[in-house]
Amino acid sequence: MPTVSMTVNGKSVSAEVEPRTLLVQYLRESLGMTGTHVGCDTSQCGACVVHVNGESLKSCTMLAAQAEGADVTTIEGLADGDVLHPMQEAFRENHGLQCGFCTPGMVMSALDLVQKNPDPSEQEVREWLEGNLCRCTGYHNIVKSILAGAQALRG
Amino acid sequence: MYQFNYQKAGSADEAASAVTAAEDGRFLAGGMTLIPTLKQRLAQPSDLVDLAGISDLVGIEDGGDSITIKGMTRHVDVANSDLVKSKIPALASLADNIGDPQVRNRGTIGGSLANNDPAADYPAAVLGLNATVITNKREIAAEDYFDGMFTTVLEEGELITAVRFPIPAKAAYMKFPNPASRYALVGVMVAQTGGDTRVAVTGAGQDGVFRASEIESALSANWSADAAKAVKMSDDGLNADIHASAEYRAHLISVMASRAVTAAG
Amino acid sequence: MTGTGIGASVKRVEDQRFLTGNGNYTDDINRPGQSHAWILRSPHAHATITSVDISKAEKADGVIAIFTGADMAADGVGGLPCGWHIHNKDGSPMLEPGHPPLAHEKVRHVGDQVAIVIAATHDAARDAAELIEVDYGVLPAVINMDAALAGGTLVHDDVPNNRCFDWEIGDKNAVEAAFAAADHVVSIDLVNNRLIPNAMEPRAAISEFDRSSGQYTLHTTTQNPHVIRLLMGAFVLQIPEHKLRIVAPDVGGGFGSKIFHYAEEAILTWAAAKVHQPIKWTAERSESFATDAHGRDHETHADLALDKSGKFLGLRVATKANVGAYLSTFGSSVPTYLYATLLAGVYTTPAIYAEVQTVFTNTVPVDAYRGAGRPECTYLLERLVTKAARQVGIDPVALRKMNMIQPDQYPYQTPVALMYDCGDSPATFESALKASDYAGFGARRAAAEKSGKLRGIGISTYVEACGIAPSAVAGALGARAGLYESAQVRVHPTGSVTVYTGTHSHGQGHETTFAQLVSESFGIPIDQIEISHGDTDQVQFGMGTYGSRSLAVGGPAILNACNKVIDKAKKIAAHIMEADVSDIEFADGKFTVAGTDKEMAFAEISLAAYVPHNYPIEEIEPGLDENAFYDPLNFSFPGGAHICEVEIDPETGDTEIISFTAVDDVGRVVNPMIVEGQVHGGLAQGVGQAMLEGCVYDDAGQLLTGSYMDYTMPRADNLPNFSVATQSVMGASNPLEVKGVGEVGAIGSPPAVINAILDALAPLGVDDISMPATSLKVWQAIQESSVRQAAE
């Protein structure tokens, strides 16, 4: 089996995997990083969103081999010890999560939005979330969280 | 997914030879359709040849009276290109509404066109703007490129290296999305380009993208939203499924065309 | 004061782990030496299994074992049981055909389990499954309920006309008399669309068998681990409870769909003892669509009798409910006791009669989904009342008000078994009208018209019964189990507390809300309190979480156990402070002797209980650890009013929700932030049912909405910001005075949305539309109406 190496949350990692291994399987199964979730098999739910080379994508729709040499950030890479990243903190403050399953993807997707659009409108947030499904919150508090997180990051 | 071999190509030629040499080789562009297809075990290629490392295949070039978008250029880069936004805003806006942000961060124009999903957006741009599909072997006029749903005239080992869009006088794209998949239930590109009026429709036709000649005639005579709306499209040859009847799709073609005319100005 | 007691919007305890990727969902768990399972499923809706040839598959790389239905049958494995017994009109029992975990001899829906392949990796198991050769004798499928009731094709050979039961409730003669005396009769035919629950976490399980102890352990995505232990242990696999441990770790949403005992749980547990290795299985989303129990799926005809003034005289309802191919765990109770017992709604209708036929079809089982029966009931009533207002020519607000149960009429005995303990529907209705600026709607409609849009406003008022359930009532209604709840409150020597609850949290935030109860009770901050749930080896017993029961039933159990702790602590305090126990007072975490300055902190007493050197050992045992079981006196009855405003683009049928106002009476609110979140989520599912979601099978029983490509999940841009408020009458049937909140959003909202759409379309002559009211359906309704009007 080929060896695939990359940087995940600042650490160099390497594992032997079959070519058919998805990036999300590499993270969850080879590295044991189970914060990134799989909620569908048609690339629509967004529970698996991570950043690769600084941009959000669905780790269920990328082969691990395609991420060879890449710089990957997952939900596990955001907090500084016990201190949450401002976007994570905004989700906590605004009750932007319930069961928590979609949350890693929501947070990672939100961070890509605010790096591209630091001051999004409510409508822009709602449209950005087209690729992230949540069944618990009705999105109301997720949208509120992202707007608050964006504000916190603007300082 | 079934087992396959994975290889990365350094150039278009290398990629083409690798695919040709393989038992059943496939190019891997952004993978936004191919990987889900493999996950569902709906395809079983022997080899995937990844195009991501080929720098020649990425970029947007100003050709004066045209814009050339290289095959591996991502939707997000088309959407955000100042050149595309200023010369063909309809194309930038179309790219900005493909799929979701994560799809736009990976999906490519070449991948989308090679796949020719009957509900994808780019086919409407290519046909509506009278673009030319450039491959490693030849140049193919938009009229000749599409060959029914999920089918094109591309041959084995033939790779889309770029797409050349002539700058239209006016153009706009309007999409009415499928509520579930968000692909086009009906998407219409209207354009005045090279002295012609063109109306290309995606999402609706059983054979994929097509030109709505009735609306083209109406708009040639009178470029107005009302003229487009007044055309009653036939529902012959249109898709019918749980999301839309053929009749509804026919109706939406006229409505989306009229709104696109308004947007195009 | 701790600031973390009842009524505070305490930030959630569980969020830190979920936000940092440290949740512990079933698929996150891996066991040393684990194998992976793939379930081979039927591609046909209805077929006999002539043969299953596993010979090629067995030899495939990595395969450990393959089992079929014949293997399980040979082992004497039982069928998956139904937990609620219903009787026919004539008193005879419902028909309960067998439900083998792995299909044996026949498959009855697409996705029915045919074989399990256990292999070294997931891909190896799936690769091998493709080598299994199943010889199916394909039979005609029966999907439509009328066709099923006509007989012909039988899903189960021993169920004539595919009818599971034909049940009734209410006084038929009184209703006939009411209709005979009526000035107006309003009739309606409705379909309550079938839904696919879609919790974001797909179902998953890992089974283990320990050969040395004979102990089975199953980690599974369930809302009620003890119920699974009881059902699977006693009825399916005959494993006694002391040898069976069920763990439900973090569960990523349930909405009812993870209540039921699923076949995969039994198959994996049984197989673990065969292969002597842990076995892991996680559903693909496609499998979730095809095999998670679906919700709703009713067809109903109803008639409402009114007098000249508009007063409701009687209600007559006939419902057909699809139960799918097999009876799921609660499948029989949803369309009966969770539905027809609410048909009085918020109204004083004196005579009600309902008959319900449940029907087997070649579709996946139908069972409880957020609201379970009450959304179907509310949709019926609120569509019917709105139609009556239009037909009789009375304003829909006035018609509702004149028929509403008034606050002084509680407790209110309905004609369909339930006694509402308390409520004030006129008050929530009035508040919702005000909050939505109902009076100003005319101007908004006129403004919308100018921009070519059709604007409509829709009302729904509702009451629901939840907090399932008072065991005596539930038992009288056919439940085969008691539905109480238990709690254990263990105070540790240094005063921190672990609470073991038999309910389960899968998004509801129990770790926070329940800790607030204890914080309030003991006067200690919630960081001193841990809520433990989900492990049958840790928690004494429990009935789990569904029917908005956790706080209303599980909460008082915790409160009672806390009170037992305080009673015992007071005795210890009395001994140590040399006072009479009747003089000991407890407040703000301190035990004091009345009239003195003597005091002891909560932690001092707990330490004394575990280090009993100066201790009344003759009278009290050491330790501070109390159990309580709580069974409520009645259901809890949340209610409220929902008002929706929509704008429709008449050219395309595209419909946008402009505003949604909900004023709900949920009794005492422990954590307002969490309560609001629960309402938001319920509303989104209600809006989803009304406008977006609908399960479609074709005539051959193939699921056409089998992925997110075709099943429309509500997305962020489909929904508005909700305006939600609570306005409560304190609950009367439990000591916390709480009611349920988990389901109210999904119960009240669908008719508000549809009534708004119909209001918008009324000027065009449209008077009916079915859910989901997609753009297509709205456009079609407009077209059909214009054709009809042209013909007239």
Image (spheres, grey):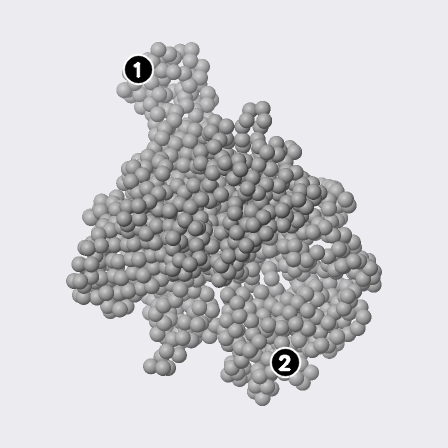
Q: Residue at x 58, y 65 (%)?
A: B183
Chain of the residue under label 1: C
Q: Which residue is at 51% across, 66% downward?
A: B243
Whether residue B193 is visible: yes
Disc 2: CA contacts within 10 A as few (<14), some (14-19) or many (>=20)? many
Which quadrant, please, contains the N terminus of chain C?
A: top left
Q: Which residue is mark 2?
A: B198
How far apart in space, not on screen, are marks 1 and 2 (Cα)? 96 Å
Residue ID at (68%, 73%) = B147
Tell me if mark 1 has few (under 14), some (14-19) or many (20+) residues whose alpha carbon lies within 10 angstroms of its own: some
Quarter of the figure that contains the C terminus of chain C:
bottom left
The location of residue C63, given as percent across then percent down, is 67, 41
Look at the image and tell me whether residue C444 can be seen: no
> Does label 2 lie on the same chain as label 1?
no
Name the residue at the left extreme.
C181
User: Mark 2: which secondary structure?
Assistant: strand
The reply, left or right, for residue A88 in relation to residue C516 is right
How far across and how far down the image is residue C123, in percent?
A: 66, 46
Considering depth in this image, is C223 or C132 the residue closer to the camera?
A: C132
Name the one closer to the observer, C349 or C671: C349
Three-letter code for the amino acid on which mark 2 is drawn: Arg
Does dot 1 land on a helix, a strand or a loop? loop
Q: Quadrant of residue A115?
A: bottom right
Give the side of residue B125 with respect to residue C776, left or right.
right
Label 1: which residue?
A: C579
Which residue sits at x=36%, y=32%?
Answer: C557
Q: Residue furthest bottom?
A: B221
